[in-house]
Image (tube, grey):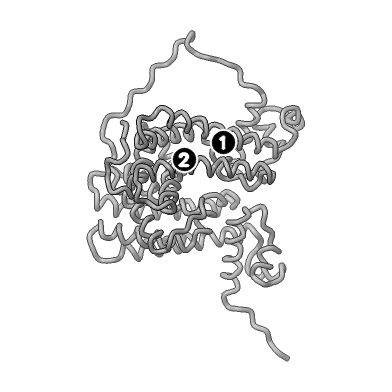
Amino acid sequence: MVTVRRPRNRKAQLADAAAELFSKRGYHQVSVNDIAAAAGVTGPAVYRHFRGKQDILAHVLLSGMDVFGLVTEEALAEPGTPNEQLDALLRAVAALAVDRREVTALWRWEGRHLDRADQTKIRHRGGDLMARWGVTLRDARPDLSPADAELLCWAALSVFGSVSVHHVSPPRRRFEALLATLGRAVLDWPVPAGAEPPAPAPLASWQRVTAPSSRREELLAAATRLFRDHGYHAVSMEDIGAAAGIAGPSIYRYFPGKAAILVAAGYRMGDRLARTAEAAIGDAADPADALARLAASYVDTVLRSDNLMATFAGELGNLPDRDRKELVRVQRDYVAQWVRLVRTVAPGLSEPDARVTVHAALTIVNDLARTPRVLARPRIAAELTSLAETVLSARSGSEATIRHRK
């Protein structure tokens, strides 16, 4: 009788196969049988190692956090000044981001599908890592407050997380060096000093505009909030109705189905981005001014449209095929405007490097706009705009390339 031994790394093989599938298709579009087939085993064999699909996702993400933690500790344990340790950390995390792009994507978008206990574990591990980064950054920059250091560490992490939102792949060593450079530019960003801006005076009763919101708009707002927090597949029409204060079946007077709500949200955000970009570029005096205005308009749009933006960025894969292709085109056209301006301002920058740079700037805004502790900062709009400008100019060779409009 011949004994067939299972590979000792079967669990890791299954996790790797799942990470790639989740990244390409989205969590809800992948079954346990899909994961088994990708790993070359039968469906029941998966359950020898995992309780189910959610357990696989938790393992992938928590293992990725463990690797991230190990890379951080090893880099910060190297001898040298705090600045030298930060450089080592940035190089190491850049290499990890390029090597494990699929895990980065899952961490940013799919963690909401975990149960509360695993979400808490990831949040705590991420917080501990950022605290470790913050200590080293403050050793290098004693002028920073703990809150400012936290802001910069999260922004730098977004630079590395940006590799999950595009498929641009410059030569590996150049890719890693570019990410490390952009991360360093963020950590070196001079936090603007100054008093908190005064709170606006309350409007008089005659100044308040009380245009009634339509029921359709209320449903769209409720749905995008739920899609952002729980994911499209986890939200039912009944959930949307309850959030908007109406019975689920009544929604069908305004939308023929849940997919139609998602389509409406996607086109609403796409139109908003196109409109604000056109206005920003049209009012500019030159390409550098256009890029600065574009950054400011993007920050303003995202802060005013956080739920729409999260739906637009994270749920495109759930759209009907025709609408998905059209909105992907809208996204690409929008990014292309940024890339064109960056390369006009910095002619020596290659198109792939410019795309990586633009996505890093956009991701900082997208991520920090979803971080409640950061959003509580009184100057957050100006700070996000300045951080985006800093990243966009980091490869130009001149800190003054983009006009910073305070």
Give coordinates of residue 80: x percent, y percent: 23, 63
Q: Three-letter amino acid code at disc 1?
A: Gly
Task: Name the residue: 54% across, 38% down.
Answer: 309
Quarter of the rendering occupied by the C terminus: top left
In the picture, measured across the screen, residue 220 lies left or right of residue 255, that is left
Name the residue beneath numbered marker 2. Answer: 337
Residue that protrudes farthest toward the top in the picture: 206
Give the image location of residue 204, x and y in percent: 45, 10
Name the kind of residue labelled 2 in the image: Gln
Seen from the viewer's position, the closer of residues 116 and 364 is 364
Tell me the SS state at disc 2. helix
Quarter residue 386 falls in: top left
> For the N terminus, which image quadrant?
bottom right
Image point (66%, 64%), residue name = 35
Q: Camera-side residue: 6 or 285?
A: 285
Mark 1 vs mark 2: give the one in front. Answer: 2
**Residue at image point 53% right, 59% down:** 102
In the rendered view, would you say 98 is above or below 320?
Answer: below
Q: Is residue 404 above or below residue 50?
A: above
The disc, 1 or 2, on the residue closer to the chain's N-terminal end is: 1
Estimate the spatial distance between the alpha carbons at disc 1 and disc 2, rounded to whole Å: 14 Å
Residue at figure coordinates x 35%, y 47% from the top left: 347
Residue 213 seen in this snapshot: yes
Horizontally, residue 69 falls left or right of residue 184, namely: right
The image position of residue 363, as x and y in percent, is 45, 45
Can the viewer see residue 127 in this picture? no
Residue annotated with mark 1: 270
Secondary structure of the residue carrying tag 1 is: helix
Residue 148 marker? none
Placement of 370 over or under 88, stated as above or below? above
Residue 316: % across, % down: 61, 45
